Amino acid sequence: MHDTPITKTPVTAALTRRRTLQLATGLLAAPFILRAGPVRAAAPMLGATRPSVNRFKLGDFEITTAADGGITLDGPHPIFGQDQDAAAVQALAEENHLPPTKMEIQFNPVIVNTGSELVILDTGNGAARRPNAGNFVAALQQAGYAPDQVDVVVITHMHPDHIGGLMENGSPAFPNARYVTGRQEYDFWAAPDRLSGPTEGAAKLVQANVVPLAEKMTFLEPGGDVVSGITAVEAYGHTPGHMAYHIESGGKRLLVWADTANHFVVSVQRPDWHVRFDMDKERAGATRKKLFDMAAADGIPVTGYHMPFPAVGYLEAKDGAYRWVPSAYELFL
């Protein structure tokens, strides 16, 4: 009997190479395994963290959105979709990967540096009003500005989460600023008969935080300018004199819609659904559709006070409704 040489098939050769590689890898790794010391303690859990400042160029302006904080509530129903069945609102939330019975509302004032003036739109909740919010001054400072550098404070409307930060410890939080708001909004909230009934809480805060500043306040009508490049836009319904603001510089545009929509899914995808916070619900729905149509048709970026931080995105018209599309990197190019 003669010895017959073994001929490796391609499959056998591949298996042999793989086994050789496994052995070599094991031999290389073995010394490290043998010399391993005691297992270290795991790094501690540090809790969730979020950014609080987002800045980009808009023509010759710099725009910063600054986080005042956020609160967790039951919802979105019945706060959003107040006139709808709970199941319909919950289904819409789940379709958009949101919890059906819990939600968060964020607060995001806007800072505009025109190069000659520093303008802020809304002031947050104020440091002492509620937990997990009232951080706007800290965010302003993180953005590189001091409160005494603010030249103009714009109040889009006079709900507490927008005017709470005007005063701190009884003194103006922005001591060198002048103030701008809508005439119709001020006249409504400053009237003495607002100090009772459903408007009582907000009206008392207006008396404490807004009325003392009236001598330094400019009252606008829609179409009026805060400064060159920042123009008031009628957005009535959420409150009687609620206004959005159109910003334009160097051919670039941004719509600051304030509280035109307060939820990036429910109020955007179903603009006609009622919202508890809206004082005139039908008019608020009509305002949403009007401003959504404008933003979608013109393709301009939008920032909304209660949109998820950094609270900048676009409105996309789709199937007779709308969709919120968060901004990506395009504003930084």
Image (cartoon, rainbow, N blue to C red):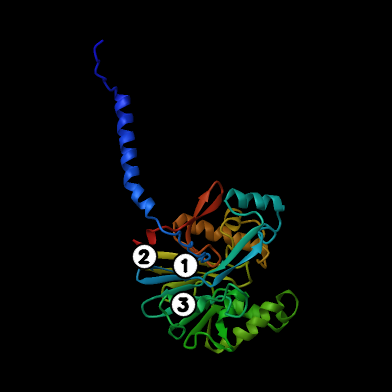
Which residue is under mark 3? 140
Which residue is under mark 2? 251
Image quarter where the C terminus lies is bottom left
Above or below, 14 against 333 in this view is above
Image quarter where the N terminus lies is top left
Helix or strand or loop: what does disc 2 sit on?
Answer: loop
Q: Residue 106: x, y in percent?
A: 56, 67
Q: Nearer the viewer, residue 44 or 230?
A: 44
Between discs 3 and 1, the one toward the N terminus: 1
Q: CA distance from mark 2 to mark 1?
A: 29 Å
Of the numbered discs in the image, which one, if any, rests on residue 51? 1
Q: Are marks 2 and 3 in contact (CB under 8 Å)?
A: no
Helix or strand or loop: what does disc 3 sit on?
Answer: helix
Between discs 2 and 3, the one toward the N terminus: 3
Q: Nearer the viewer, residue 57 or 106?
A: 106
Q: Is residue 225 something that shows in the picture?
A: no
Total marks drawn?
3
Q: Residue at x 58, y 55 (%)?
A: 265
Residue 115: image quadrant is bottom left
Q: Amino acid at mark 2?
A: Gly
Helix or strand or loop: what does disc 1 sit on?
Answer: loop
Q: Residue 6: x, y in percent?
A: 26, 20
Q: Amino acid at mark 1?
A: Pro
Of the numbered discs in the image, which one, if any, rests on residue 84? none
Q: CA distance from mark 3 to mark 1?
A: 13 Å
Q: Amino acid at mark 3?
A: Leu
Near mark 2 (Cα within 10 A), the count class, few <14, some 14-19 or many ≥20, is few
Q: Are marks 2 and 1 in contact (CB under 8 Å)?
A: no
Q: Residue at x 63, y 56 (%)?
A: 272
